Image (cartoon, helix red, strand yellow):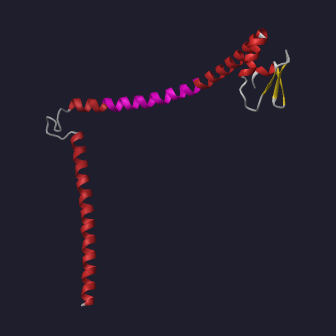
């Protein structure tokens, strides 16, 4: 609740100033800016007190938010640094491996892990394509056999 209500009273939908006869239609959920402007122009001393009170409340809430944010932020930093460290080590391992092997074949005639991995992928891809083609050709044979047997039944 705003500290402005220390200087105004609310009766129904009308706000009354406690210092003078000022009254303002104040519907629910309306901003208190007009009331603060009245305080500033007609009652500067009360306005100064109002500003001091409202800044104290804001500072308290900001301090609480900072405390909460630091805990949350520290957890985020901790978890992200672990992931970053893992990523960096994996990248470094890949770089080291590439630096050791200049081509797909090492000097001693053995295949590097990178080359064997790509060959494995290519082989798996070919096998997959073959199985798809076999499934289609098998399905075609089955359909052709059924059509052929139906044709023989009709003849």
At a point 77% along the width and 28% down the height, the residue shown is 26
Q: Which residues are magenta?
A: 70-92
Q: Residue at x 76, y 32 (%)?
A: 28
- In this rendering, the answer to whether 45 lies above or below 8 is above
**Where is residue 107 drawn, in percent x and y?**
14, 34
Quadrant hosting residue 152: bottom left
The C terminus lies in quadrant: bottom left
> In the rendered image, which quarter is residue 134 located in?
bottom left
In which quadrant is the N terminus drawn?
top right
Query: Is-magenta flag for residue 80?
Result: yes
User: Front-most of 48 and 96?
Assistant: 48
Horizontal placement of 115 versus 66: left or right?
A: left
Front one among 111 and 76: 76
Kindly report the secondary structure that dominates the magenta region of the rendered protein: helix
Q: Position of residue 100 (x, y in %)?
A: 21, 30
Seen from the viewer's position, the closer of residues 23 and 2 is 23
Residue 86 in the figure: left or right of residue 23: left
What residue is at 68 percent from the left and 19 percent from the top? 58
Above or below — where is 126 with respect to 74? below
Where residue 115 appears, x then y in whole percent?
Answer: 21, 41
In percent of width and height, residue 20 lies at 85, 15
Q: Nearer the viewer, residue 39 or 88?
A: 39
Queried whether the magenta region covers residue 82, the answer comes back as yes
Tell me what residue is drawn at x 81 percent, y 31 percent: 13
Q: Classify residue 12 as left or right of residue 123.
A: right
Q: Residue furthest top?
A: 45
């Amino acid at each position: 609740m705003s500290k402005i209500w220390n200087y105004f009273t609310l009766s129904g939908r009308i706000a009354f100033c406690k210092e003078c006869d000022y009254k303002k239609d104040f519907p629910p959920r309306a901003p208190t800016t007009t009331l603060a402007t009245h305080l500033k122009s007609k009652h500067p001393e009360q306005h100064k007190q109002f500003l001091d009170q409202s800044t104290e409340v804001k500072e308290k809430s900001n301090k609480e938010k900072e405390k909460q944010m630091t805990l949350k932020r520290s957890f985020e930093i901790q978890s992200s640094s672990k992931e970053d460290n893992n990523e960096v080590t994996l990248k470094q391992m890949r770089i080291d491996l590439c630096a050791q092997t200049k081509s797909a074949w090492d000097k001693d005639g053995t295949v590097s892990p990178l080359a064997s991995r790509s060959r494995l992928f290519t082989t798996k891809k070919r096998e997959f394509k073959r199985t798809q083609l076999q499934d289609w050709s098998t399905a075609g044979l089955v359909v052709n056999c059924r059509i052929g047997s139906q044709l023989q039944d009709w003849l």
